[in-house]
Image (cartoon, rainbow, N blue to C red):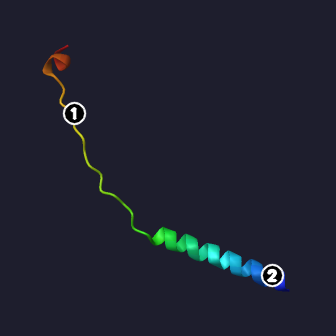
């Protein structure tokens, strides 16, 4: 009986950890990088 309780506690802690990690807002806004292209390359 005791190993079952330990297993349930470990699974609950893992689920709580995954839920906490999923809730963290770490989204970084994307920055657009545009490179200058010489016109002679476009003319070919």
* Residue 2 percent across, percent down from the top left: 83, 85
* Residue 33 percent across, percent down from the top left: 24, 41
Q: Residue 9: give its label.
A: none
Would you say the residues marked 1 and 2 are in contact, meaning their CB atoms lie under 8 Å apart? no
Tell me which residue sits at (16%, 22%) in the image.
38
Closer to the chain start, of discs 1 and 2, is: 2
Residue with the most extreme left position: 39
- Secondary structure at badge 1 equals loop
Tell me which residue sits at (30%, 52%) in the image.
30
Quadrant (top left, top right, bottom left, bottom right) of the C terminus: top left
Residue with the most extreme top position: 44
Q: Residue 35: give its label.
A: 1
Residue situated in front as seen by the camera: 6 or 34? 6
Count of numbered badges drawn on the protein: 2
In the figure, residue 15 lies in which quadrant?
Answer: bottom right
Quadrant (top left, top right, bottom left, bottom right) of the N terminus: bottom right
- Secondary structure at badge 2 equals helix
Tell me which residue sits at (37%, 61%) in the image.
27
């Amino acid at each position: 009986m005791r190993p079952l309780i330990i297993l349930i506690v470990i699974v609950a802690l893992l689920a709580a950890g995954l839920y906490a990690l999923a809730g963290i807002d770490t989204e970084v806004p994307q920055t657009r990088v545009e490179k200058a292209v010489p016109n002679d390359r476009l003319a070919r």
